[in-house]
Amino acid sequence: MDIQLKRGFIEICVLSLLSKGDSYGYALIRDVSSCVEISESTLYPILKRLEGANLLTVYTEEYNGRLRKYYTITDGGRKHLREFPAEWREMTKIYSFIKENSEEVRNG
Amino acid sequence: MDKKAFLDELRNRLSFLPKDELERTIAYYNEMISDRIDTGMSEEEAVKAVGSIDEIVESVKAEGNYQGVKETDKQYRTFTNIMLIIGTIALYFALVWDIILSVGFAVSTVICLIGAVATAITLGAPAFLIFMGMALILTACFLITIPIASYIRFGIRRSKEAIRR
């Protein structure tokens, strides 16, 4: 899948997981991977961007004698999730448009 | 590769990052490896699972243009180091080898005078004045160096004697 497109989807996947409760890096990779294959080096910039855009916040907690970072969804992040269905409908509209025009896509 | 070797190597390869960003990245991969070990993986397997160092460095570079920061930073550091070395050498000569320094100034003065004459013919008055000015400054340095250096050496000798006493 196109890397930019994939990143956009993974962002939504991460936010959707966080909307159920706080999580940490490895758990996010494990959970997202059940749907899209994702590596540590893919997740890192995504978490950074989401934090920068104020869609999630980070806090550190001790676990097993070491520090672990936990991620919490913000109100902005929840708003982002609420906007996703509308974006998705727009995306399916674009898809049918492309399918209508291209024989390659229809037969692909 | 064990966790420590992996993180050390990663730290080396990412040394172009700003310090806080570097620490953040290392902490992230450290946590990822530890979490995998906690699920029952061996250290070796856990390190392998987070991906190759090349891949990580590539993804970091793709994120932001840190390369530029690195180069200017390096150049600035090199420049500062060179200036420090020159300064140290100059100070050493001024204190211990005032004769060599004076000879150096004298030679520079003569070269500047020759330059002044040469440019007076080829480039005209402004260049001639610049060279003459430099020659005058160098002559002044030459004249000042000997008494100052002697004075400093005299001071050093006296304090040495004072310590001996």
Image (tube, rainbow, N blue to C red):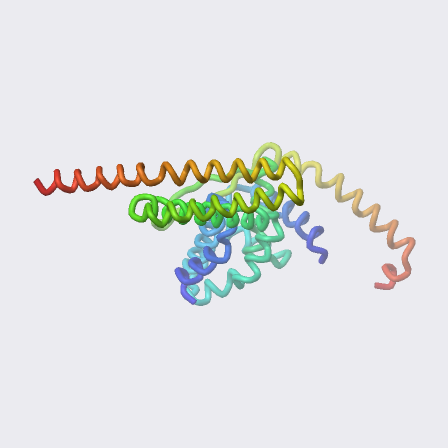
| Residue B17 shows in this picture | no
Residue at (68, 36) in percent of width and height? A82
In the rendering, at what x and y percent does residue B100 appear? 36, 50
- Looking at the picture, tell me which residue is in the foreground, B116 or A19: B116
Residue B25, given in percent of the width and then of the height, sits at 49, 50
Q: Nearer the viewer, residue B114 or A2?
A: B114
- The quarter of the image holding the N terminus of chain B is bottom left
Q: Quadrant of residue A89?
A: top right
User: How far from the left and from the top, in percent, is residue B123?
Assistant: 66, 42
Q: Nearer the viewer, residue B72 or B147?
A: B147
Quarter the C terminus of chain B occupies: top left
Q: Residue at x 33, y 40 (%)?
A: B146
Query: Could you tell me if residue B144 is visible in this image?
Result: yes
Q: Using the image as rendered, state which of residue A24 and residue A5 is in the foreground.
A: A5
Q: Is residue B111 above or below residue B137?
A: below
Residue at 55% over, 62% down: B54
Locate residue A80 relative to residue A30 in the image: left or right.
Answer: right
Outermost residue to the top:
A75
Residue B115: % across, % down: 57, 46
Numbered circles on residues, count: 0
